[in-house]
Amino acid sequence: MSVDHKVSSLLPLLSSPRLLPDESEAEFQSGLQSLLSELDNPSPLAVALVSQLNESLWWIKRHTVDKELLLHEAMARLLSKAGSYGEIYDNRKVSEALERYLDGSADNDEAAWIEDILAKSKLTLSDLRVRAFKDAANHIKMVDDLIHRQHQTMRHLQRSIDSIDYKSRLIKRMDLELAALESEQPVKGALTLDAKPS
Amino acid sequence: MTPNHPRSLANRCNSLKSTGPRSVAGKWASSQNSRKHGLNSAPDFESSLEYKALVVLVAEEGFSGFACADIAAGLLNYRRVMNAYYDTYTSPEPVNEFMHDMSVKGSIPIFREMLSESGSKPQDVRDMAAFFADMQRQERRKGGPVSRRSADSHKLIRYQRNGIARLSRAVRQG
């Protein structure tokens, strides 16, 4: 049975991992294929477990991006709070402008506006980042917990895959030994039958 | 308490006035009112077609009957948890931007104007401002969309831990 056939036999019975609208299906599938190519014995169950492993890796990527986004969120919050002594800033507007400013895709007006709020609040970008880290520490810890959970899940899945591999190797070895014994048996049986008591 | 006790009779009379759901569909609908992810309800995998097909496929790999049943249920349960995890992650509680950005201090004249029509006292205006300030604090504490989805997903960690442990145990003991 080919790997593709094994993938098609068990995976349709399980709900497949869902992707976010901006994520690449091709990238997800190529990750899965590279993991499947590492399998010694791609049985349907092993393929199903590897698929779960690939999903865990994908979640780790998502949560790692979230850690940076949490920092940006906290930076925007601090910035809109710091700038609101003189006038009221819309948190979403500051957040979107800051995102583009950090990306380097902000236009001149937007960049000047962000720099103006930074100057008004007497902060540099690195100061703001440090403060944001402190401000978002609770949520960053939560995301760290989520990443840790995925690592633990991967460990469980790896152990399960190893046990299937070991089991199949054991069955194969026992089959070989049994075949060897069976091939020896008729000869021995023949000898015992032939040996007539004197 | 005897059935003829006044309190007991009053309870019986009051229960007749109950406006709760009466039909099966109504009861089912109201049972879903506080449903968040559904992971606390006991799933019935055994009667599903997927379960039966999984058991047959896993049996072909040389697992015993009990192990096949455990592995199939473990796999379906793990998928159920991961689907709930995805749903929680992708639909966090929306940010109330009005509450988040409003200036409570700046709104005091508006509160005053609103309450003056009903002849309220200055203390009432202060109470209203304090109420909105408290709501704003709560809203801001929850953070933005990323903070909210992280906090919501964090609540499902124990379900993931139990789900993967069940699956892993079933495979390794099989």
Image (cartoon, coloured by chain):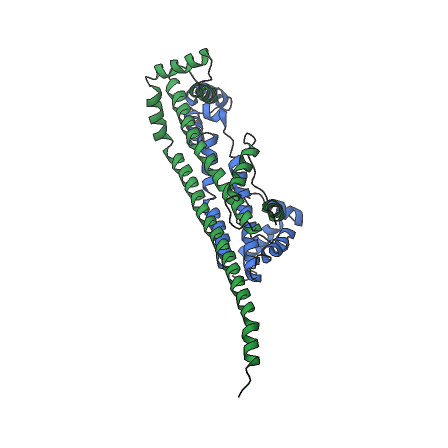
Chain colours: A green, B blue
Q: Position of residue B34 (x, y in %)?
A: 55, 43
Count how many numbered circles sit on residues in the image: 0
The answer to whether residue B113 is seen in the rendering is: yes
* Image height of B55 relative to B160, above or below: below
The answer to whether residue B102 is seen in the rendering is: no
B22, B66: nearer the viewer: B66
Q: Residue A79: which quarter of the image?
A: top left
Q: Position of residue A148 (x, y in %)?
A: 41, 42
Which residue: 38% across, 37% down? Answer: A141
Which residue: 43% across, 20% down? Answer: A98
* Image height of B102 relative to B63, above or below: above
Q: Position of residue B6 (x, y in %)?
A: 54, 56
A108, A76: nearer the viewer: A108
Q: Position of residue B17 (x, y in %)?
A: 62, 48
* Image height of B38 relative to A193, above or below: above
A178, B17: nearer the viewer: A178
